[in-house]
Image (cartoon, grey):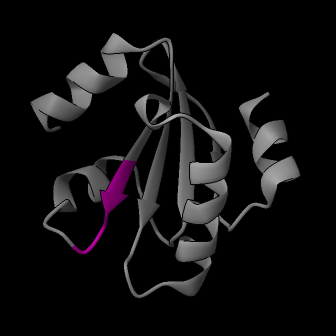
Amino acid sequence: MDSNFAEALASQETVVVDFYAKNCAPCRRLSAVIDQTLSNDKVMKIDVDEDQEDLVTRFDIRSVPTLILFKNGKEIRREMKALNKSELIEFLG
């Protein structure tokens, strides 16, 4: 796993990782919802088409968009669809 990615997960209590692709319309909709709802320091965006094969494989990303919620460096929740604002808030728990 990329050391910068691991450091970012470890440095925050809660981090949302957004696995997306630039040519994915649902990914763009979800990205807009994330940008309106969360501060940038709580979100990591990973473009699956940008040489991120190690992360895609490690986290078994099979479709985009995929959101993974990490708390204290551990995955606690995953969603594989474009969420609206209320669904995103619920996802964050």
Does residue 55 appear to the left or right of 92 in the view shown?
left
Image location of residue 42, percent across then percent down: 48, 30
What kind of secondary structure does the magenta stretch mostly adopt? strand
- Depth check: give the residue in front, 79 or 14: 14
- Depth check: give the residue in front, 60 or 24: 24
Does residue 87 appear to the left or right of 35 in the view shown?
right
Residue 61 occupies quadrant: bottom left
- Depth check: give the residue in front, 47 or 76: 47
Q: Give the number of callouts.
A: 0
Image location of residue 1, percent across then percent down: 17, 38
> Which residues are drawn in magenta?
45-49
Residue 41 occupies quadrant: top left
Image location of residue 68, percent across then percent down: 54, 43
Q: Which residue is at the far front?
A: 36
* Residue visible at 39% across and 75% down in the picture: 21
Figure check: 40 above or below 54: above
Image location of residue 34, percent across then percent down: 61, 51
* Residue visible at 22% across and 20% down in the picture: 7
Does residue 29 appear to the left or right of 93 in the view shown?
left
* Residue visible at 61% across and 78% down in the picture: 26
Quarter occupied by the C terminus: top right
* Magenta segment includes 8: no
Figure check: 47 above or below 38: below
